[in-house]
Image (spheres, rainbow, N blue to C red):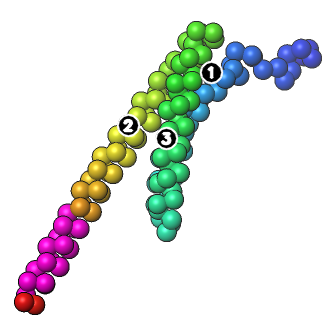
Amino acid sequence: MSNSTVGTVTPQASSLAHQAAKGSWASAVIVFALVAFGGRTGAKAIIELAALLLIAVGLLLGIVALFGIRKHGTKGILVPALVGIVMNALLVSIFVTNFIAARARFRNAATTMQTVAWAGLDRRR
């Protein structure tokens, strides 16, 4: 075994674009694990904020990886970057729909509470 082949890393496989592509889909997998196992803790809001941050980072990494295609080619970049972008975009859509639904529930509850409070004031008269 020659010394020139031991421990060498192919420069193309360790480029920023390749690492960003891997990081893009890996961040989505980490979000799934974080939400699945972190939902059992009491700090649900903090875990969801961390998940949202990871989703944003994953999208950014996927876009960065796509910009590296011109220099490094599509091999090892295009598919992982697109998978990461799609997974993170789906997670963003889930987050947004859940946020809108929670906001609507809160507004309904606030309206109901306000109606009950006004009804209570009317009875006192």
Most extreme residue toward the front, as rendered? Answer: 125
- Measured along the vertical axis of the image, is residue 89 above or below residue 33? above
Q: Is residue 96 left or right of residue 42?
A: left
Q: Which residue is mark 3?
A: 55
- Tell me the distance, in whole angstroms, between the alpha carbons under discs 3 and 2: 10 Å
Q: Position of residue 117 (x, y in %)?
A: 17, 79
**Amino acid type at mark 1:** Ala
SS state under label 2:
helix
Residue 88 showing in the rendered view: yes
Mark carried by residue 124 = none
**Amino acid type at mark 2:** Leu
Q: Which residue is mark 2?
A: 90
User: Magenta segment, which residues?
Assistant: 108-123
Q: Is residue 122 magenta?
A: yes
Most extreme residue toward the right, as rendered? Answer: 3
- Give whichever of 24, 113 is nearer the camera: 113
Mark 3 or 2 closer to N-term? 3
Q: Which residue is mark 1?
A: 17
- Give whichever of 100, 13 is nearer the camera: 100
- Measured along the vertical axis of the image, is residue 100 above or below residue 22? below
